[in-house]
Amino acid sequence: MEKPGHTAPAIVSCPSCAKLNRVDLGRLAAGPRCAACGRAIHLDRPLAVTDATFDRVIGGTATPVLVDFHADWCGPCRMMEPILDNFAGAHAGKLLVLKLDTDANPGIAGRFGIRGIPTMIAFRNGRETARHTGTADLPLLSRLAGV
């Protein structure tokens, strides 16, 4: 349970229109909406980031961030989807779960030296704190993200 007045700022892309929005993860019950299109932004599931938005989202988020570096064609990546959905839902408001398609976003994937997928990288205060390559279960994701 979050304390009244608790703020946990984050910058996220709207899944509908891709506009970046500042939201307060400490106030998820208020139901954040996109400032551009007005649609709900659901933070209980992984949100997509791109080469263009990655640095703003990672740098503008006060809570821990877990990024799934994946590709649509990757079987183990597809196996991770429901696990990451459950993880994001269980930790909504305490951490932000993101996904980056390495085929569509080679700049960030190259910058972080992604050689195998899926790779999960945890960030705090914009800095990498841990990483894991391969499939992972919920306890491993929790240890990785520090939650």
Image: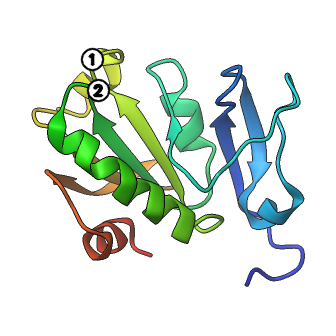
The image quadrant where one finds the C terminus is: bottom left
Q: Residue at x 69, y 48 (%)?
A: 42
Distance from Cα at disc 1 to Cα at disc 2: 8 Å
> How many callouts does the rendering have?
2
Q: Is residue 12 left or right of residue 132?
A: right
Q: In the picture, which quadrant includes the N terminus?
A: bottom right
Kind of residue at disc 1: Asp
Q: Is mark 2 on a helix, strand or loop?
A: loop
Q: Name the residue under label 2.
A: 72
**Up/down of 139 relative to 44, above or below:** below
Q: Which of marks 1 and 2 is in front?
A: 2
Q: Residue at x 84, y 40 (%)?
A: 33
- The amino acid beneath tag 2 is Asp
1 and 2 marks in contact (CB < 8 Å): yes
Residue 21 in which image quadrant:
top right
Residue at numbered disc 1: 103
Q: Residue 74 carries which label?
A: none
Kindly indicate the quadrant of the structure image that contains residue 53. Answer: top right
Is residue 39 at all visible to an observer of this figure?
yes
